[in-house]
């Protein structure tokens, strides 16, 4: 129960923080914001790595490996495409 | 000790994610911010690899190489016009990864001593539900954007009730999973129900509302990640998932406001016009002044202040490079050129800005609606390219119109308005646009790219 309360506290605080930080992103960067946040949501990679690496059963290893593939697409694809876009934004 | 260091690395990663998003508050700091985010991810991955539960690296390496390769291929080959499709797919993959991780975790829990906690089982059910809805919903959104599937709203009577029942069933199964965690079939049943829900939830959304639904699915993918954080009791996942979730919600709100539509109407495909098209004749008859490139060039000749209003049509015609050339030519003559960008121009939030940036338009020339609207009275020429509903003055004047109250770009206040369009066909809202028949408006019927190049040629010859 105590663990849950800590996790819930972090969830609530992180949401407030998210609203504060992201409200300041100007509309001109909203597309890179979306692709960049996709990259960040690739953080599920850490759960995926643990399952693919600890290999409790064949099933969990397969699920974990598939998860590594999809999370890694998000991480690499997300950061890379965001980088491509952001580099194009220039001042006169 | 090792565990403490791993957890510290996760906090560092989360901090870098936050800094990465914070730096997106200005184009000047954005590139570095994105790299900070990537560094955070690298730190999180390396920290996870030293976890002592890992017995073999082969599968991790296999998945990592395949995923990295596919991700890099997607990112490098994606066209800027196709960015909405790319983001739709990434939303989906994020959701699917959460589903797989939660599924693996609940299966593993059965081999560990002690019963899975209530937190874990409930979070697992929610990860499956949200993640699967995100995955299939995103695939539907992708198919609509890519043109694989019709953009039209697909709905049947009682759809909301049906969706509500599916949601209740999934939640009931989550409760049953929490009650008897060793019956894992419940988890896969939840995923099965969420599959149907993913389709029936997103199919009713029409083409014009795609910017909203992409933002919403973005948020869902974050929520699925946060739920998976509760499954694994991992704070990095909870923080990152929350950041993405709140980002998507903010964008969803901005898009809904910019269209003056409620999220409920977007999700049910309601509120699009019916029967209004018959009045097109009354609005346009005898009042349309059509011009050719030479006449447009003559008008530009005397202009000091030009504002270009890009719409989805500009993206479809791939006209952004031609537009940038025209702007450069006018600027070389001492004319001021700016771009007025409506929040829902294009197919996703900020899409037009990316397309213009690709054509080397400086970001300080791209003006937001609220910033540019007071200036239109001083504008000599407003050039509207492939935009329609977002410049329709009916939104201000006719409270019965389907776009009533939608904030629009006040181009009708400019001294001269030139509207470039292929025909008088209505926009997404399906209603005629009195701007096209206004005294100060000239219609230039042409394809976006070809038309702009012809104006440029005419200007060079004069």
Image (spheres, rainbow, N blue to C red):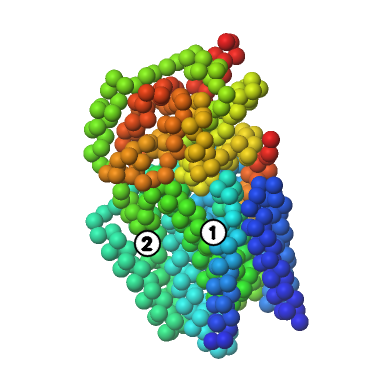
- How far from the left and from the top, in percent, is residue B68? 65, 54
Residue B101 left/right relative to B425 = right
Residue B431 left/right relative to B55 = left
Can you tell which mark lies on residue B201?
A: none
Q: Are marks 1 and 2 in contact (CB under 8 Å)?
A: no
The correct choice, above or below, for B299 with respect to B176 in the image is above
Q: Is residue B243 visible?
A: no
The correct choice, above or below, for B116 with respect to B274 in the image is below
- Disc 2 chain ID: B
Quadrant of the rendered image containing residue B8 = bottom right
Which residue occupies 50% across, 38% down?
B374
Secondary element at tag 2: helix
Q: Which residue is mark 2?
A: B197
Secondary element at tag 1: helix
Q: How far is disc 1 from disc 2 in space, using C-alphas?
A: 23 Å
- How far from the left and from the top, in percent, is residue B322? 57, 26
Q: Which residue is mark 1?
A: B247
Q: Spot the residue most to the bottom.
A: B114
Q: Residues within 10 Å of mark 2 (few under 14, many from 20)?
A: many
């Amino acid at each position: 129960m105590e663990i849950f309360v800590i996790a819930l506290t972090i969830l609530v605080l992180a949401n407030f923080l998210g609203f504060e930080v992201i409200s300041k992103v100007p509309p001109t960067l909203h597309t890179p914001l979306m692709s960049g946040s996709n990259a960040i949501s690739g953080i599920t990679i850490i759960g995926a790595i643990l399952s693919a690496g600890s290999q409790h059963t064949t099933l969990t290893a397969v699920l974990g490996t598939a998860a590594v593939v999809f999370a890694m697409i998000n991480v690499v694809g997300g950061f890379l495409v965001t980088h491509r876009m952001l580099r194009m934004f220039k001042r006169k | 000790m090792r565990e403490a260091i791993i957890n510290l690395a996760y906090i560092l990663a989360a901090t870098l994610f936050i800094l990465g998003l914070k730096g997106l508050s200005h184009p000047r700091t954005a590139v570095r911010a994105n790299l900070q985010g990537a560094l955070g991810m690298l730190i999180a991955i390396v920290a996870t690899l030293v976890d002592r539960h890992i017995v073999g690296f082969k599968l991790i390496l296999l998945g990592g190489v395949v995923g990295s390769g596919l991700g890099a291929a997607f990112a490098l080959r994606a066209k800027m016009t196709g960015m909405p499709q790319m983001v739709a797919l990434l939303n989906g993959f994020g959701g699917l990864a959460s589903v797989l991780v939660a599924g693996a975790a609940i299966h593993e829990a059965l081999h560990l001593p002690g019963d899975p906690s209530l937190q874990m089982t409930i979070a697992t059910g929610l990860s499956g539900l949200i993640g699967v809805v995100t995955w299939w919903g995103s695939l539907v959104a992708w198919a609509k954007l890519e043109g694989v599937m019709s953009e039209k709203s697909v709905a049947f009577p009682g759809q909301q009730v049906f969706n509500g029942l599916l949601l209740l069933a999934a939640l009931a199964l989550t409760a049953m999973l929490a009650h008897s965690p060793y019956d894992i079939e419940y988890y896969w049943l939840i995923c099965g129900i969420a599959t149907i829900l993913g389709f029936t939830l997103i199919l009713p959304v029409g083409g014009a509302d795609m910017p909203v639904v992409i933002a919403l699915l973005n948020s869902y993918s974050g929520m699925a990640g946060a739920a998976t954080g509760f499954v694994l009791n991992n704070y990095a996942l909870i923080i990152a998932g929350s950041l993405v979730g709140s980002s998507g919600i903010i964008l969803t709100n901005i898009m809904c406001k910019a269209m003056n539509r409620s999220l409920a109407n977007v999700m049910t495909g309601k509120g699009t016009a019916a029967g209004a098209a018959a009045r097109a004749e009354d609005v346009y008859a005898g009042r349309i002044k059509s011009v050719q490139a030479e006449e447009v060039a003559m008008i530009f000749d005397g202009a000091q202040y030009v504002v270009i209003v890009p719409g989805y049509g500009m993206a479809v015609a791939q006209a952004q490079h031609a537009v940038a050339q025209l702007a450069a030519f006018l600027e070389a003559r001492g004319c001021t050129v700016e771009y007025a960008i409506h929040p829902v121009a294009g197919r996703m939030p900020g899409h037009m800005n990316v397309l213009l940036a690709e054509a080397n338009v400086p970001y300080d020339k791209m003006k937001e609606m609220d910033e540019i609207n007071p200036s239109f009275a001083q504008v000599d020429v407003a050039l509207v390219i492939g935009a329609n509903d977002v410049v329709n003055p009916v939104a201000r004047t006719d409270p019965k119109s389907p776009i009533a109250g939608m904030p629009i770009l006040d181009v009708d206040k400019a001294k001269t308005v030139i509207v470039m369009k292929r025909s008088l066909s209505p926009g997404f809202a399906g209603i005629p646009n009195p701007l096209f028949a206004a005294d100060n408006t000239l219609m230039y019927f042409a394809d976006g790219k070809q038309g702009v190049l012809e104006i440029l040629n005419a200007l060079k010859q004069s």
